[in-house]
């Protein structure tokens, strides 16, 4: 009997993000909101207007980016659509890293890898199976071997692996195990 694929909601990413890095990602996206695709931009702006309160501002979207970002970390941790829109927006701000990571994941023959252009917000969430032989440090080294990415942090490279692979490392498996699960 084939086991049905299990998915975690996008907010599950918070289990793998440090508080300072979460704030940095949100700040980067809000700082470049005009470069984010309209679908994600609308979700982000509506969510902030509805759920974020920034003291001194009736409309939280008019607050300075730093205050708005800090005030919206709570909805990133609890509101699935907002978390997905922020990470998808962040992903769109790093096209070269996205392409390189996609090539690395293809070379490593990751299962169920979706095209780079796909809007991942429309998918059900993260798969829970992560190849045991490919922890973050292995993927980081592979990406840096293809392209140095001196300006990209290990955190950014790891987040790109999570988003492009649509996997969180909850259930580590070896190659033979994956074939049984699919």
Image (tube, grey):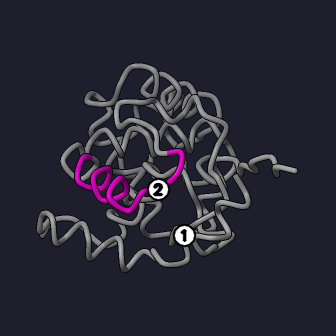
Q: Which mark is residue 110?
A: 2
Res 147 quadrant in image: bottom left
**166 versus 80 height, above or below:** below
Would residue 34 be found to the left or right of residue 87 on screen?
Answer: left
Q: Is residue 66 visible?
A: yes
Q: Tell me the crowding category of disc 2: few under 14, some 14 to 19, or many 20 or more residues within 10 angstroms, Cα based.
A: some
- The residue depicted at 72 percent of the width and 61 percent of the height is 180
Would residue 128 be found to the left or right of residue 68 on screen?
Answer: right
Mark 1 or mark 2: whose residue is earlier in sequence: 2
Residue 99 on image: x %, y %: 24, 46
Q: Which residue is mark 1?
A: 131
- The majority secondary structure of the magenta stretch comes to helix
In magenta, the rendered stretch is 99-112
Q: Secondary structure at mark 1?
A: strand
Res 169 quadrant in image: bottom right
| Residues at discs 1 and 2 in contact (Cβ within 8 Å) | yes
Furthest-right residue in view? 1
Would residue 158 be found to the left or right of residue 133 on screen?
Answer: left
């Amino acid at each position: 009997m084939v086991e049905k694929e299990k998915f975690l909601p996008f907010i599950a990413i918070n289990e793998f993000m440090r508080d300072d890095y979460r704030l940095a990602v949100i700040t980067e996206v809000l700082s470049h909101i005009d470069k984010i695709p309209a679908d994600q931009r609308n979700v982000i702006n509506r969510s902030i207007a509805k759920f974020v309160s920034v003291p001194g501002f009736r409309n939280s979207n008019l607050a300075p980016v730093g205050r708005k970002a800090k005030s919206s970390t709570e909805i990133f941790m609890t509101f699935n659509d907002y978390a997905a829109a922020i990470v998808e927006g962040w992903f769109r701000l790093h096209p070269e890293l996205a392409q390189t990571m996609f090539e690395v994941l293809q070379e490593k023959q990751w299962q169920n890898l979706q095209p780079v252009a796909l809007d991942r917000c429309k998918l059900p969430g993260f798969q829970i199976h992560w190849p045991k032989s490919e922890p973050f440090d292995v993927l980081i080294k592979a990406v840096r071997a293809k392209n140095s990415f001196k300006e990209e942090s290990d955190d950014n490279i790891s987040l790109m692996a999570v988003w492009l692979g649509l996997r969180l490392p909850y259930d580590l498996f070896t190659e033979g195990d994956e074939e049984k699960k699919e």
